[in-house]
Image (spheres, rainbow, N blue to C red):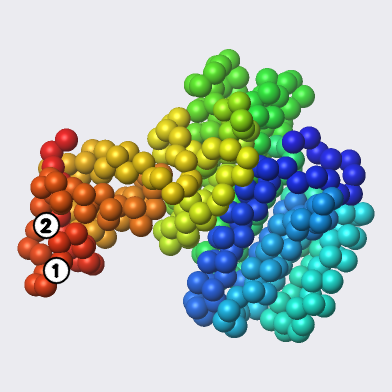
Amino acid sequence: MAAPKTTTWQLDEHTRAKHAILRRYLDAWMPILSLGGFPRIVFIDGFAGPGIYADGTEGSPIIALRAYLLQAATIPSQVDFHFIEKDEERAALLRQTIEELLAQAGPHPKLTYQVHSGSSFNEAYLSIVRFNCSPRTPVFAFIDPFGWTGIPMSTIASIMRSTQSSEVLINFMFEEINRFLAHPDQVENFDDLFGGPEWRDIVKLSGRERRERIRDLYAAKLRDVAGARYVRYFEMRNERSHTDYYLFFATKSLRGLQKMKEAMWKADPAGGYTFSDATVPDQLVMFGPEVALQRLESDLVNRFGGQSARVEDIEEFVVAETAFREAHYKGVLRELERSGKLEVINPKQGRRRGTFPAGTSVRFPTP
């Protein structure tokens, strides 16, 4: 989507899907972190916009605030929201929209917010926001630009390395990046985006190889430069099955990865758009009620075939290394046991067939 010139604009279906994912993740993120004894939690929206679309649909800042306001239990932590919006008219509308929401919600003394206007995401973060992020402050940053400039890998690294519990959700505008990758005026911008010159070797490539190399390079940089332990990238294609963008999620927490996968699987891909998880290049995974468990069975047998494994190790593999959630693997184990292909080793007394409680070990068939 080209950057709009008006104060508000129409919501497209890609953005609607992104916002569904954001909403579901924050619904889980805030209460989990509130139980960790953190005095402060920080949410950053790097490209906040006006907070509302032309048809009245709420934007990401209001979605984030509602995720806090609608929590069933009181969150004891101070929660600071930083909304960065360079355009002054949009920032003014955002402030108005936030104040209307908070007036309806009533007092919330643990909530603070700031709208940082007149500066880009990069400028505002480096000059103001980062000083609110102490080493023990969990930070979640939603970075949703219209293009590829202004989100240097050095700043992503600053966010990820500033605290022990930092996470980022980044809209990586693949279609535009791919289209302008060879443009001579964009060399410095792409050096900043990727955190180095390695992307230049990709310019001469084409088709699938070019797409995969662009995607994989950015993921590698999130790990190696930004310091993420887990990086997942989810592809969104349009109705012509062309890649529009990737949503990159980077975290140091396996539990955070679990919750993001739940958000992705539960989100409704409105308009027939398809998400795919980049664990298996070009292996499209529809986020809906029908799960491709045969694919997961193949992944498990290839990884653990002929070996014994604890269910805890199986779960970590599924969450960290496959397109699936931890909720899916036990269905595969049940089917393998039912068909006689899976052996339960020294089952606990009273265990029911088809159940795999913590501490259970199983042996997989040889692939």
Q: Percent from the top left, x then y, of residue 3?
A: 81, 38
Q: How many marks?
A: 2
Q: Position of residue 46 (x, y in %)?
A: 72, 53
Residue 39 appears in which quarter of the rendering? bottom right
Judging depth in this view, the residue of 44 and 129 nearest the camera is 44
**Residue tagged 1:** 351
Name the residue at 15% across, 66% down: 352
Amino acid type, callout 1: Arg
- State the SS at label 1: loop
**Mark in front: 2 vs 1:** 1
> Where on the picture, by quarter, is residue 113?
bottom right
Q: Amino acid at mark 2?
A: Val
Left or right for 81, reference 327: right
User: In this rendering, does residue 155 appear at all?
Assistant: no
Q: Which residue is mark 2?
A: 344
Figure check: 144 above or below 72? above
Quadrant in which the N terminus appears:
top right
Does residue 349 lie above or below 339 as drawn? Answer: below
**Which residue occupies 62% across, 48% down?**
17
Report x, y in % for residue 160.
57, 56
| Drawn side of residue 293 relative to residue 133, left or right | left
Q: With 91 as the anchor, is 184 left or right in this view?
A: left
Asked if labels 1 and 2 touch by Cβ distance under 8 angstroms, the answer is yes
Does label 2 or label 1 sit earlier along the sequence? 2
